[in-house]
Amino acid sequence: MSNINNARAASASGLDKVVAAETALSHVDGEAGRLIIAGYDIEALVATHDFEAAAALLWATAGLDPVPDAESVRRQLGEARVAAFSLVPVLLAATRGLTVTEGLRAGLSLLADDDASGMPDHIRAVGAVPVFVAALCRREAGEAAVAPVADAGHAADFLRMLRGMPGSAAEVEALNAYLVTVMDHGMNASTFTARVIASTRAGLISSVVGALCALKGPLHGGAPGPVLDMLDDIGTRANIRPWLAREIEKGERLMGFGHRVYKVRDPRADVFNKAVMLLTNGNERIRFARDVEAVALATLKEMKPDQRLDTNMEYYTAVLLEALDIPRSAVTAVFALSRIAGWSAHVMEQERVGRLIRPQSSYIGNWPDERAA
Ligand code: ACO
């Protein structure tokens, strides 16, 4: 195959630039480094909304009736966290030996599509995640699960269930900034997965379980753990450049760099960088991460001159969640804690479209008459 055909095949196999849906939920401008969520630039949304308010905004934008507001969402999610806690013994018994993300996948599968509780599916799903993730993390640390508090904020209650004691106001603010920032991001792989499943009318819970499976991979939401492993492995400033160059020479990808849509710096990286600076006052770990980032960008430019590779949000997600003492094994599940609100909004939007997503493939196998020859 010629190089041009190779490039075409690679692009088609990744559906680059293919428009798969219309959405009012978010827009990613990869050339300008701009992310708009429900009419807000991401920086403005983070400055004015906590998790519940941003989720209410997304669900209202998706056409949810009655139109939700931050307070009704706060109350409903508190009730949903309490309801989910009754499933924790079953969850822990069923997930021995699984990672936190795999455990969360099993936990969401315990929920019925369209159950008889009267609690909306998106509320049950979003409310269950912090409860399950905290219990799974505490099991890893040999600790008993901590019950939710219905009238606490979603972010604050997660930190409290995770640690067994409340986080500081600055930590809750930083976690809210993270959760709002990653809530939705155009037609990324996990959101597309959710919409495909929703288009079959399988239901919201089934759609978000599938989305979580797509999020788990290191090319999507699984990168922050490996980013921290990379920082640890590099270890010293003298080792930064040789370590990175060796990895690229071996054909490995540097975790936290490159993006299908952003060809400039991911604007979410700057939001996290700001939050982590406030939280840590720019400690040695952050200074080291910044030094690694600078050398990585220079090395990628030199060794991959034909690619436009910049820092993606997973790089600073890693250092921000580490500064919040979130266990490394839980970073992808904490991403899901937020993104599930976005997936739910996309499911609502897709269900209103009501049409099955069913693309075509191009057959490159043998025809029956050729097979015999
Ligand atoms: N390090 C080194 N090389 C890279 C990187 C990287 N991080 N990212 C892409 N490249 C190279 C590829 O090796 C390839 O080069 P080649 O043609 O010489 O082999 C070229 O750039 C194009 O790569 P594609 O895979 O076609 O680009 P794609 O648009 O599919 O990549 C992706 C996007 C998957 C995010 C990629 O940049 C990557 O693997 N990054 C590392 C993992 C990561 O950070 N994931 C989190 C993404 S953010 C999120 O999902 C929330």
Image (cartoon, rainbow, N blue to C red):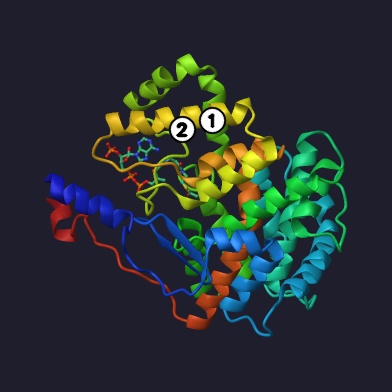
**From mark 1 to mark 2, how far is it between C-alphas?**
6 Å
Q: Which mark is residue 289?
A: 1
* Residue with the mark numbered 2: 293
- Percent across and percent down for residue 295 are 41, 27
Task: Specify the farthest residue to the top.
Answer: 238
Q: Is mark 2 within 8 Å of ligand 1?
A: no
Residue 103 vertical position relative to residue 25 in the rendered view, above or below: above
- Mark 2: which secondary structure? helix
Q: Which residue is drawn at 82% across and 41% down?
A: 163
Residue 188 located left or right of residue 46: left
- Disc 1 residue type (three-letter): Ala
Q: Which residue is drawn at 79% across and 71% down?
A: 76
Q: Are marks 1 and 2 in contact (CB under 8 Å)?
A: yes
Query: Can residue 67 be seen here?
Result: yes
Residue 311: quadrant of the picture: top left
Residue 286 located left or right of residue 31: right
Q: Which residue is drawn at 17% across and 53% down?
A: 371
- Mark 1: which secondary structure? helix
